[in-house]
Image (cartoon, rainbow, N blue to C red):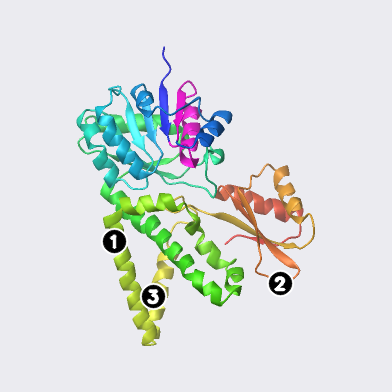
Amino acid sequence: MEKKRVVIIGLGLIGGSIALAIRKKHPAVTIIGIDLDQKQLKIACALGIIDEASNEIKKEAENADLIVFSCPVKATETFLTQMVSWSLKPTVLVTDTGSTKGSIMDAAAGLLAKGIHFIGAHPMAGSHKSGVQAAKVDLFENAYYLITPADNQPDSQAVVEEFKQWFDGTASKFLILSPAEHDQITGMLSHLPHIIAASLVNQTTDFSVKYPLAKRLAAGGFRDMTRIASSDPTMWTDILLSNNQVLIQLVTNWRDEMSQLLEMLESNDSKAIYHFFDQAKETRDAMPIHKEGALPAFFDLFIDVPDYPGVISEVTGYLAQEKISVINLKILETREEINGILQLTFQNQEDLKQAKSCIQKNSSYHCYNK
């Protein structure tokens, strides 16, 4: 019996992690990777994430049983329109991982009209790291995997079940919604916060020239609040253009709210200012804690450590003994005393909890998570 062939177009963190998750549940498949970056393809082959590397997207797509687009939205749209003239297998399933769905579903209309099965999808998970070398088989575990089946697709329920079988290895929580719902929700909960974070960071450029100490002091809460501003600018340009109409309205609403806040400040309206923060506090406190959602979750542990050689290797050594993986590490330079703050970032809440217990058991260092 011929092996099924999976073609993944775009081998970054998401594409690589999807390849690992598919192989976990479907070890007999052949996974072909396609990427403009030849270095990423070589790394993916060397790590065993894919079986074959190729640059012939049409040829590979025509022999595929599953095609996954994990490239920028605009590139995916271009390929979807081109594929209408290709000789795809009638049983092939085509899907994507883009952060916007309306324009993707529009681009897939030609394929759907030909009877090709297509499901728009968006795995809501990420990492501090990028590139296929950062791929993890459990990247999507317990995260929401949003899917937007087409309304006019024959046997829609059967296609959804086929999709879930292919991606069962992600251990995700599949959630079905319409493309319009998806773009409105991710626009508010992901795209707008990225815009605001980038705006705050950009505002500090000239400010830091006048007040040089600002950059040093930004190592605290400001840096945590704006961490998402470090995202790939090419990807975010693509997302904003793809979700253009939704974001125009959201940014307009944000501008209007800031105008109202400005009026409160100018009139010294203490009641209105109090209500502004009180309402935000109530809404924020009602949100689920450490659930994978539209923004990447950051599982950080802060440790007060003395400033002497070897202290970092000492702390990480404790974690290594208990096989607890750290995905990022930094020293926060916000204190002038003898103690510094070591910030460790973990993949999930359980790793953070185990790390905190491990360090408290092996040392007298004070550690805490926010």
Q: Is residue 228 left or right of residue 254?
A: right
Q: Earlier in the sequence, mark 1 or mark 3?
A: 1
Residue plotted at (71% across, 49% down) = 316
Q: Identify the magenta region.
A: 10-35
Q: Which residue is mark 3?
A: 276
Q: Which mark is residue 84?
A: none
Query: For residue 169: magenta?
Result: no
State whether residue 105 is above or below residue 230. above
Neighbours of disc 3 within 10 Å: few (<14), some (14-19), many (20+): some
Q: Earlier in the sequence, mark 3 or mark 2?
A: 3
Residue plotted at (32% across, 53% down) = 241
Assess whether mark 3 and mark 1 are in contact (beta carbons under 8 angstroms): no
Q: Position of residue 131 (x, y in %)?
A: 52, 42
State whether residue 292 is above or below residue 202. above
Which residue, as the protein is rendered here, is positioned at the far bottom? 267
Which residue, as the protein is rendered here, is positioned at the far top? 1
Residue plotted at (41% across, 39% down) = 70
State whether residue 125 is above or below residue 254. above
Q: Position of residue 176 (x, y in %)?
A: 32, 42
Q: Which residue is mark 1?
A: 248
Please name the amino acid that badge 1 sits on: Ile
Q: Is residue 56 left or right of residue 151?
A: right
- Whether residue 144 is visible to the viewer of this picture, yes or no, is yes
Q: Which residue is mark 2?
A: 336
In the rendered image, the quadrant that contains the N terminus is: top left
